[in-house]
Amino acid sequence: MTTTNNSKWVIPSSHHLASKSLEEEKAKWDENHEDYANNAFSMTQDPEICKALVRPNQCSGFDIPNSPDIKVLIPGCGSEIYLQKTLLEFCPQIGQVYCTDFSKTAIKKAQENWKNANGDSRLNNQQIVFEEVDSTRITEQRPDWQNRFDYVLLVNAVVSSEDEANRQMIGEFGKVLKPGGKLYGFFPTIYCFLEIAYLSKNHAHCLTEGFIDLPHNTVWGVDWRDPQIYYSPLRLNRIFKEAGLKRLSLETYFLDSDILAPAFEQDIGHDDPDIYEWTLLARYEKSV
């Protein structure tokens, strides 16, 4: 899939960044998932993150129904199973849950973690399917998934360093949703890091030294994060629109919990307890 002439505000490939091939990306994530706890950071370890997608406190209209007719896709699932366990905690009668990742190791580890999971989630094991699928090629690799799912759930799963790849993913999520199906997900935004650069003296250099690249909406550091696209709300909203999805809500979600705030503080070494990462909680619906 390539971006069409109707695509708006496309970000050109960043030639000044060392783009990885698909094989290199897979190798990197295979290595990360061998010991994910020490190689990466999962937002889903905070139960409130998972609950915000499945059964939000303040927005009952966005609850996922506890029904055997409901089919859910969790693309870019990685090797952790926090979201899956939360989904079955609130929706024990749900029909089918498919969890995909392009990393073979991630899927293998996720299967092992689910097999060894404690509690009631093990009783619903037949509802969970883990499968190696590339999010940019879902309907090519699984054509039977076209218009199949009622919900797509995402937690920072659209994080490529190439705008075209991210647009392909969102386009594929639109294709696999049924008409009227919904996408709920967390998406990092460029404005979070702009705020940190302005508010934290220790990170003011992020602006002056180009760690935040406004023309390309990217954030990176030598020893901090891999290159990836961080979108503004307007650009992200347009990409969803091009994928045939209409906005239900777009919220600022502060990652200030006792679990996530200390991890972020350690990650970037900021100097203010009132500074923490924030992200966009997006809810969209496929046009009927």
Image: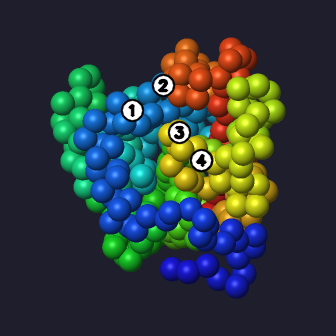
Residue 204 figure quarter = top right
**Residue pictured at 25% horizontal, 41% vertical:** 34
Q: Residues within 10 Å of mark 1 (few under 14, many from 20)?
A: some
The residue labelled by disc 3 is 224
Q: Secondary structure at mark 2?
A: helix
Tell me which numbered mark, 1 or 3, is placed earlier along the sequence.
1
- Taking the spot 62% from the left edge, 56% from the top edge, the residue there is 229
Give whichever of 237, 183 is nearer the camera: 237
Residue beneath disc 1: 82
For the point 42% across and 54% down, the residue is 75
Q: CA distance from mark 1 to mark 2?
A: 8 Å
Q: Are marks 1 and 2 in contact (CB under 8 Å)?
A: yes
Amino acid type of disc 1? Answer: Tyr
Three-letter amino acid code at disc 4?
Answer: Trp
What residue sits right under mark 4 in the picture? 220
Q: Are marks 1 and 4 in contact (CB under 8 Å)?
A: no
- Left/right of residue 269 with respect to residue 151 in the rendered view: right
The answer for how far apart the CA atoms under marks 4 and 2 are is: 28 Å
Dot 4 and dot 3 residues touching (CB under 8 Å): yes
Q: Answer left or right for 84 relative to 263.
A: left
Q: Between residue 62 and residue 36, name the one nearer to us.
A: 36
Q: Name the residue that disc number 2 marks.
A: 47
